[in-house]
Amino acid sequence: MENYEYILETEHVQKSFGELEVLKDISLKVKKGEVICIIGPSGAGKSTFLRSLNQLEKITGGKIFVKGDLFLHRENDKTVEKLDRKKRQELLLEMGMCFQRFNLFPHKTVLENVMLAPVEVKKADKDTIKKEALDLLAKVGLAEKADEYPNRLSGGQQQRVAIARALAMKPEIMLFDEPTSALDPELVGDVLNVMKELAAEGMTMLCVTHEMGFAREVADRVLFMADGIIMEEGTPEEIFEHPKKERTINFLKSVLKQ
Ligand SMILES: Nc1ncnc2c1ncn2[C@@H]1O[C@H](COP(=O)(O)OP(=O)(O)O)[C@@H](O)[C@H]1O
Ligand SMILES: [Mg+2]
C-alpha cells in the first residue's frame, strides 16, 4: 500500500511572469491511476501549469505535493519550504513529460534517444536498459525503427519515440502537453492510441489536449481552464454533455464546430 492519498496535489498554486498573473489559484488533487484531460483556450495557463508541476517553471505561490510529500511551498515568490535535493530529484523522475515538440537528439538513433536518460541517471547495466528500450519501442509500435535517425521518421513516429523516451525512466505520472497538435491529422491517431493504452494500463496522466474525442473517451475527469483558474471540472459527460458555465459552453461550441 502507498502511504499517500493523492499522487499529486496542488494547493492555491500561483504563477506570475512579472506583472502578468498566469496561474491565479490552482488547487488539484490527483489520485494514482487517474487520467485528467485539461482543455481550454490558448493563453489559459495550461502549459504553465504542467511546466510548474515539473519544475520547469518556478511557482510564485502555493504548494505542490508529490506522493504525499510537500515538494515545494512558495509565497510571494519566495520559498517557504522544499524537500531536500536528493528527494526532490527522486520525485521529479517520477514525472515524465511529453511536449508538443518532441526535441529528439538528431545525431542519435531512436534507440539511443530512448536509452540516454536511463543510462545517465539510473546507472543500471546497459544490456538491461537496451532491452527495456527495445520493449518500449515495440510498445509504441516502432520496434523496426530502433536504428533509424529521428529525421527519417514522421512527426507521429517521432512523438511516439518521445513517449517511449519518457517512459524509459519509469515515471509514475505522465504529463502530456498537446502531444498531437503539431502533427498532420492522419498521424494523430497512432499517438492517441499509445496514450490510450497507457491510460488502460493504469498510468496516472495529465493531458493538455485539443482532442475532445480522446478526452471524452479516456479521461476520468476533464478540467476546463481559462484565465489562470480551473473554471469548471467534471466527468467527460458532465463537461461535454452538460457544461454549466457560459465560458465552457462557448469554448466547446468553438472547438467542436471545427
Ligand atoms: N516564460 C514566459 N514569460 C512570460 N510570459 C509567459 C511565459 N510563458 C507563458 N507566458 C504567458 O502566460 C500565458 C499563459 O501561457 P500558457 O501557459 O502557454 O497558456 P496555454 O498553454 O493555456 O496556451 C500567456 O499569456 C503567455 O504569453
Ligand atoms: Mg500551451
Image (tube, rainbow, N blue to C red):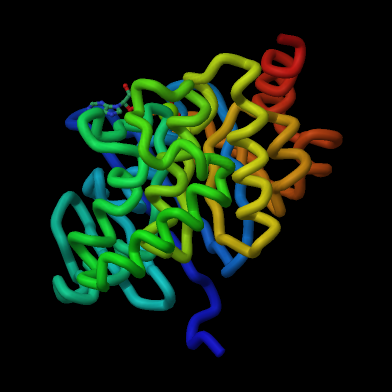
Residue 12 coordinates in the image, percent (x, y): 40, 55
Q: Quadrant of the N terminus?
A: bottom right
Residue 24 seen by the camera? no
Residue 22 higher or lower than 52, as above or below: above
Residue at (41, 42) in percent of width and height: 146
Residue at (62, 16) in percent of width and height: 185
Residue 70 seen by the camera? yes
Left or right: residue 21 compared with residue 168 = left
Q: Quadrant of the C terminus?
A: top right
Q: Quadrant of residue 122?
A: bottom left
Residue 197 coordinates in the image, percent (x, y): 66, 51
Left or right: residue 85 compared with residue 8 = left
Residue 190 coordinates in the image, percent (x, y): 63, 33
Residue at (70, 36) in percent of width and height: 214
Q: Quadrant of residue 215?
A: top right
Residue 167 higher or lower than 181, as above or below: below
